[in-house]
Amino acid sequence: MISPQNRHRNIYSKHIVIAGKEMARGLSRDLAREKAQKKTVSQKGNKETALTPAQRQERDAKALIEKKLLKETKKEEDIKTGKITEQEIKQEEEKKQRLREKQRMSAFASNNPLLAKTLQQGK
């Protein structure tokens, strides 16, 4: 039978056993730090980290322009084939504009709620 002193010692041991290896408590912190360091080293292989902010901005601007052109050509094709009409496009753009305005006001209101409230009452 295990005496109360030995049982207490076993429960509150200063050593942790992981994968068959006995190690001190502080060592687990060191192992976690090494693991995180390996993870960051593997992420540094990403090509996008080598770009400067100006280069990244230029790349993003080109991507947005290409995306906009593709959207416009798709709209033109849909109009030619009769999938959508000019009126439907106009309604969709008005709806998007209202949503943008609502989002803009929401952001403004979150930054300055009192001023936003007085502006809403003035309308």
Image (cartoon, helix red, strand yellow):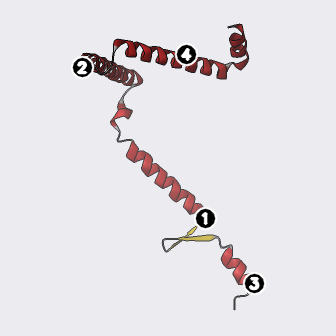
Of badges 2 and 1, the one in the foreground is 2
Disc 4 target residue: 101
Q: Which amino acid does the dot numbered 2 rest on?
A: Thr
Please name which of the two marks, 3 or 4, marks the residue nearer to the observer. 4
Distance (Cα) linking label 3 and label 4: 71 Å
* Of the image marks 1 and 4, the number of the one nearer the N terminus: 1
Q: Position of residue 111 (x, y in %)?
A: 66, 21
Of the two numbered discs 1 and 3 in the rendering, the one whose residue sits closer to the viewer: 3
* Marks 2/3: CA–CA distance: 86 Å
User: In whole angstroms, how far apart are the C-alphas of marks 2 and 4?
Assistant: 32 Å
Is the residue under label 3 in contact with that under label 2 (CB below 8 Å)? no
Give the residue furthest to the top: 122
Residue 6: % across, % down:
70, 83
Circle 3 is placed at which residue position?
A: 4
Q: Nearer the viewer, mark 2 or mark 4?
A: 2
The dot on residue 25 is 1
Whether residue 51 sits left or right of residue 7 in the image: it is left
**Label 3 crowd (10 A; few <14 / some 14-19 / many >=20):** few
Mark identifier at residue 81: 2
| Residue type, numbered disc 4 | Glu
Q: Where 28 falls versus 3 (above or below)?
A: above
Residue pictured at 38% horizontal, 12% vertical: 87
